[in-house]
Image (spheres, grey):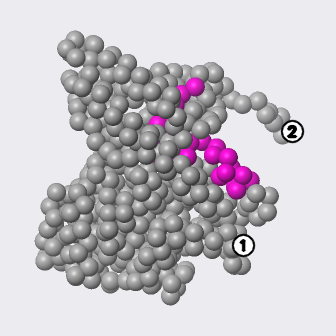
């Protein structure tokens, strides 16, 4: 006889046990610490509700919740599509994906007319580099020291930190990592071997919210172009107004051949990423669209979210500038109050990194902030840094609440070592 089905949600204990048995004991343990024994149960706007009834502000979610959780415009658009046709035949043309591609290209100013849709950021990275190699007939790609581009094998080759490559020998892509401070790094590399593309994050997210210098990026683009190589801006974390503008690279006047976006592109409701490309870079795929495709690429549910997400992002852009200015001011004040624990802090818009003296102190801060009602993201590639990623919908009161929680955590971090503040 079939086992009876139950609709009761599992207890927090059952969740941890399932994670431990079927995924990873470490995943179960870190979740248990972060939630102090509770699991996530629901979310709305900037706030997440835990299974024990507590709530926490969500300044983490790996940069996905730019619109907060369950933005009503995005939820309604996805629900409508769910009622009509959630999945595509892939043999008939799909109007939702076509409209989303046109909307995204237009949103980024129209200079990059071609769009490939994936689900995760790494999908957009993979296709952009594959296209650069196909279009140039060259293999070598330049990426940047400190850069993060994902963990699938191709994207992982571009990601700098060896922490993510432990146990793996060799790179799938022929990559050289260049110094982000050296304006002539691309030129130097071009002298030794032909290059297909240079890929960079205008603001390095995983590396602790570090903006790269615009003059350096301009020089890299110029040198790449003068040798027939492409320039790709990975804005999966910093784009879509996370750092103020729809695209940091395009706003800074960089003549890039592709802008990669992801994370909040599906409005924080569904997974969606995109490589938005020039005609030249995209040429191999325009000629043969099956050179690169995936079962769920351009999925109607995800694509239905895109126009609603971009509309909401634009409606909230002005408010976001206020949140960003207040946050920058608040972080300056905290740095003055806690000079011994809080090292440098850097970032742009709604993407900030706070440096701690040791990885242990940063790890403890993540856990203690969560326990006190503020969820933040660690930086996996730079473990001394904690990332703050507030949503555009954050209210002034929520921002003050977050800064208060940070203040308490920084004071506590100084206390055990008896550090004078
Ligand atoms: N590129 C950047 C700049 C990212 O920050 C990330 C993820 O954090 C990725 C690529 C990979 O995205 P995903 O984890 O969705 O594959």
Q: Is residue 116 visible?
A: no
Which residue sits at x=32%, y=73%? Answer: 255
- Secondary structure found at label 1: loop
Residue 112 to residue 33: above or below: below
Q: Quadrant of the N terminus?
A: top right
Figure label count? 2
- The residues colored magenta run 55-79
> x%, y% of residue 29?
47, 28
Q: Is residue 242 visible?
A: yes
Q: Quadrant of the C terminus?
A: top left
> x%, y% of residue 178?
20, 62
- Depth check: 149 or 395 in front? 395
In the picture of the structure, the residue carrying the numbered disc 1 is 89
Q: Spatial distance from mark 1 to mark 2, Cα to Cα? A: 36 Å
Residue 300 to residue 286: above or below: above
**Label 1 vs label 2, nearer the camera:** 1
> x%, y% of residue 200?
31, 62
In the picture of the structure, the residue carrying the numbered disc 2 is 1
Mark 1 and mark 2 lie on one chain; the one further toward the N terminus is 2
């Amino acid at each position: 006889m079939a086992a009876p089905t139950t609709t009761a949600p599992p207890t927090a204990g059952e969740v941890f046990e399932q994670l431990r048995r079927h995924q990873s004991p470490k995943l179960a343990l870190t979740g248990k610490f972060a939630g102090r024994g509770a699991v996530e149960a629901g979310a709305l706007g900037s706030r997440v509700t835990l299974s024990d009834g507590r709530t926490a502000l969500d300044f983490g979610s790996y940069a996905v919740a730019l619109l907060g959780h369950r933005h009503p415009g995005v939820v309604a658009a996805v629900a409508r599509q769910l009622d009509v046709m959630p999945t595509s035949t892939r043999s008939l043309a799909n109007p939702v994906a076509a409209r989303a591609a046109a909307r995204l290209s237009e949103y980024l100013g129209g200079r990059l007319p071609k769009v490939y849709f994936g689900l995760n950021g790494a999908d957009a990275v993979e296709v952009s580099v594959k296209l650069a190699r196909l279009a140039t007939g060259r293999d070598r790609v330049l990426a940047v020291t400190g850069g993060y581009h994902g963990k699938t094998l191709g994207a992982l080759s571009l990601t700098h930190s060896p922490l993510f490559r432990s146990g793996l020998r060799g790179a799938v892509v022929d990559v050289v990592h260049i110094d982000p401070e050296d304006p002539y790094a691309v030129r130097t590399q071009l002298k030794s071997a032909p290059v297909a593309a240079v890929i960079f994050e205008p603001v390095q997210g995983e590396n602790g919210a570090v903006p790269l210098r615009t003059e350096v990026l301009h020089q890299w683009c110029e040198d790449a172009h003068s040798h027939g190589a492409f320039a790709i801006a990975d804005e999966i974390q910093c784009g879509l107004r996370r750092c103020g503008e729809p695209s940091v690279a395009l706003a800074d006047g960089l003549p890039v051949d592709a802008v990669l976006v992801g994370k909040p592109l599906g409005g924080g409701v569904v997974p969606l990423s995109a490589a938005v490309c020039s005609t030249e870079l995209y040429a191999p795929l325009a000629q043969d669209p099956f050179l690169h495709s995936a079962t769920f690429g351009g999925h109607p549910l995800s694509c239905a979210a895109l126009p609603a997400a971009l509309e909401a992002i634009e409606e909230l852009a002005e408010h976001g500038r206020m949140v960003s200015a207040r946050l920058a001011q608040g972080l300056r004040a905290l740095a003055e109050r806690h000079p011994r624990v809080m090292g440098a802090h850097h970032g742009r818009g709604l993407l900030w990194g706070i440096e701690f003296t040791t990885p242990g102190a940063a790890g403890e801060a993540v856990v203690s902030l969560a326990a006190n009602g503020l969820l933040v993201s660690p930086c996996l590639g730079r473990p001394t840094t904690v990332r703050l990623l507030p949503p555009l919908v954050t209210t002034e009161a929520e921002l003050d609440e977050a800064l208060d929680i940070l203040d308490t955590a920084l004071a506590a971090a100084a206390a055990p070592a008896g550090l004078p503040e």
